[in-house]
Image (tube, helix red, strand yellow):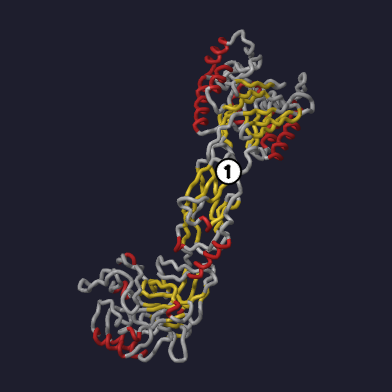
């Protein structure tokens, strides 16, 4: 198929010239920006019960609501409650849990010792009641690994939840006898959990992830509230360079210590005092955590040494668009992958291998847009992008953008006089079904010579070189196919204005199937539709047909073809039923598509009596050249077509 696209080529040049610098990007953002934030609550410890000392259990719900409202207002990525969500009674969860669950973002729990101040048969239900994935677990946000531990695993109060850990608990308890942290309301972590912690930190380290750990009981400094086997945990933490902080509750008055560059923060309990609250929003920066305390909670700055990693990849979620779309069309969304959590990374075009079509596109808000009208003939388009983080480290990648042909749907219909029956209102399928003489078919008669596969218009005078039907055999022809026709589009009646041509199958009802041919046309464009056949006069739409909603439709069956006063269009065989004139057997190029005359009769005379042959002299398409074909020729002798040659 051949196309004319000079207009679009000019548009591309103009768009490129006028917007050659639109894709240039500003320098990367400053590094000292909040990457994300998360919320922390410790020891809500709600129950519908009287205060005990300075602990106001029943006042925690409005305090919790204030914390949730603050977290929502600051759009934290998630929040964690560091244990002792209730004081006692399983039913307490029904009052307090819905408040915490009303957060706009994810919310997580650790288990505290008061979690187990419920009935023995209710203790194994705690994880499911709180929607926890397990007793200890981890999750990733912005390439930070958050590790939630269970400090209540080896404890006297959790025996019903961990019956298989009783022996290990008793052994550990005996080992710490006489130490300041040998308290029954504390607990320890099993070797199984410690091994999991080691593996989780190793995995996080291999992925360049910083880690923060959360639990109910502290592990440092050593005091009456510290975890029984605190040193086992510290040894694991200090063996990994990616650990930033360990955060916990339990000690309601709070605490802070730093040991070997790891921060240990004990958050104050929410339940203390009748009305003064305590919770925190932790802001994450590239080189520190900023603990912003509310109410009684102190502020902390927790610095760490960042090890900047260059961006590792650039992803484009779509690299294929339709051709001929307007300048400014969205191609796809860009994402720069950087293991430095939510590093501020800028994307820009750069010179280098693969930068051929950089100026055809631009980037805005990490989205790739077209900077020109793209033509599928020029596809693929190659661009080179660079991701630069706020420390100046870069990564470059080449992308290939494909513009796919904009194919329109066609709905063309035509009748041919030779095959049409005024009785049935349909055309016959004798060449296809009765005799199997269409190109590529195996004839019914063993004496017949098969017609070579391929559309029949490659020869003179059409000289159309399309490959439609090249591999056709019997199974490729539907039972209601009549023959092949040739369809072309012109921007004016003149043949030299032709912009597209394709061979197609003609069906009994007049429908033309152009097979997989792609007519690359745009809405609003208009074309004359021309249909040609081996032994019928061509027809052309009486006026240009406009492409609408990516569809081009024309029905020759219900209206006369293009015509002039000196020649003919279509033939009306019944009221409002029009057909292509039969008898134009095309014996020479001079009258091609123009006139039924004596030259056509000569061809019929030479082949009269021949059957089982795919030949132009078989005007009625029944596979037998005889007097019926001559009758059609005789009736139309002298008729000429108005379609310009």
User: Dot 1 corresponds to which residue?
Assistant: 345
Q: Nearer the viewer, residue 47 or 190?
A: 190
Question: What x and y, as percent, mark residue 549?
Answer: 54, 67
Q: Nearer the viewer, residue 459 or 505?
A: 459
Number of numbered discs on residues: 1
**Hey, which residue is sitting farthest left in the picture?**
447
Q: Is residue 576 left or right of residue 253?
A: left
Q: Is residue 73 left or right of residue 246?
A: right
- The quarter of the image holding the C terminus is bottom left
Question: What x and y, as percent, mark residue 366?
Answer: 58, 49
Question: What x and y, as percent, mark residue 527?
Answer: 49, 76
Q: Is residue 128 left or right of residue 267?
A: left
Residue at 63% x, 24% y is 263
Is residue 125 in view?
no
The quadrant holding residue 338 is top right
- The quarter of the image holding the N terminus is bottom left
Q: Residues within 10 Å of mark 1 (few under 14, many from 20)?
A: many
**Hey, which residue is sitting farthest right in the picture?**
275
Residue at 69% x, 25% y is 267
Residue at 45% x, 51% y is 353
Is residue 289 in view?
yes
Q: Is residue 212 left or right of residue 272?
A: left
Q: Is residue 451 above or below residue 325?
A: below
């Amino acid at each position: 198929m051949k196309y004319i696209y000079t207009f679009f080529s000019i548009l591309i040049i103009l768009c490129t010239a006028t917007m050659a610098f639109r894709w240039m990007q500003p320098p990367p953002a400053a590094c000292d920006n909040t990457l994300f934030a998360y919320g922390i609550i410790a020891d809500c410890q709600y129950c519908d019960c009287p205060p005990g000392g300075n602990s106001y259990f029943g006042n925690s719900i409005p305090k919790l609501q204030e914390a949730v409202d603050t977290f929502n207002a600051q759009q934290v990525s998630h929040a964690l409650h560091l244990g002792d969500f209730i004081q006692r009674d399983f039913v307490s969860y029904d009052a307090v849990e819905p408040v915490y669950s009303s957060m706009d973002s994810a919310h997580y729990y650790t288990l505290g010792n008061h979690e187990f101040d419920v009935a023995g048969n209710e203790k194994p239900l705690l994880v499911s009641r709180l929607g926890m994935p397990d007793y200890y677990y981890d999750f990733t946000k912005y390439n930070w690994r958050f590790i939630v531990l269970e400090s209540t695993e080896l404890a006297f109060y959790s025996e019903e939840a961990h019956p298989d850990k009783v022996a290990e608990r008793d052994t550990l308890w005996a080992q710490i006898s006489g130490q300041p942290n040998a308290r029954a309301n504390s607990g320890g972590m099993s070797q199984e959990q410690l091994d999991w912690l080691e593996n989780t930190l190793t995995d996080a380290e291999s992925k360049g992830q910083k880690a923060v750990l959360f639990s109910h009981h502290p592990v440092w400094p050593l005091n009456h509230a510290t975890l029984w086997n605190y040193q086992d945990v510290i040894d694991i933490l200090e063996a990994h360079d990616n650990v930033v902080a360990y955060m916990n509750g339990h000690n309601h008055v709070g605490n802070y210590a730093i040991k070997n560059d790891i921060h240990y923060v004990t958050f104050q309990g929410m339940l203390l005092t009748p009305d003064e609250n305590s919770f925190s929003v932790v802001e994450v920066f590239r080189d520190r955590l900023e603990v912003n305390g509310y109410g009684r909670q102190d502020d902390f700055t927790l610095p760490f040494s960042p090890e900047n990693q260059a961006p590792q990849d650039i992803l484009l979620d779509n690299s294929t668009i339709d051709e001929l779309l307007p300048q400014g069309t969205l191609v796809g969304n860009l994402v720069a992958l950087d293991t430095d959590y939510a590093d501020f990374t800028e994307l820009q075009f750069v010179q280098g291998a693969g930068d051929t079509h950089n100026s055809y596109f631009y980037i805005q808000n990490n989205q790739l847009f077209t900077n020109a009208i793209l033509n599928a003939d020029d596809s693929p388009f190659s661009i080179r992008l660079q991701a630069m983080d706020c420390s100046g480290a870069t990564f470059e990648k080449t992308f290939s953008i494909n513009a796919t042909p904009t194919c329109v749907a066609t709905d063309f219909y035509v009748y041919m006089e030779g095959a049409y029956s005024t009785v049935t209102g349909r055309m016959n399928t004798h060449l296809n079904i009765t005799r199997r003489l269409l190109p590529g078919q195996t004839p019914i008669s063993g004496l017949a010579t098969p017609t070579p596969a391929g559309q029949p218009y490659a020869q003179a005078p059409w000289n159309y070189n399309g490959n439609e039907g090249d591999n056709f055999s019997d199974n490729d022809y539907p039972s209601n196919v009549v023959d092949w026709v040739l369809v072309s589009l012109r921007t004016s009646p003149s043949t030299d204005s032709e912009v597209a041509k394709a061979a197609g199958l003609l069906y009994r009802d007049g429908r033309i199937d152009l097979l997989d041919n792609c007519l690359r046309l745009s809405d609003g464009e208009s074309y004359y539709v021309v249909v040609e056949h081996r032994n019928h006069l061509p027809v052309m739409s009486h006026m240009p047909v406009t492409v609408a909603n990516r569809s081009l439709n024309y029905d020759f069956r219900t209206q006369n073809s293009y015509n002039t006063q000196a020649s003919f269009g279509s033939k009306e065989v019944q009221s409002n039923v029009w057909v292509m004139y039969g008898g134009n057997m095309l014996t020479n190029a001079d009258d091609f598509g123009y006139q039924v005359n004596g030259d056509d009769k000569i061809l019929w005379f030479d082949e009269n009596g021949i059957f089982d042959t795919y030949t132009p002299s078989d005007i009625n398409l029944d596979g037998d050249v005889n007097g019926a074909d001559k009758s059609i020729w005789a009736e139309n002798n002298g008729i000429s077509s108005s379609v310009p040659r």
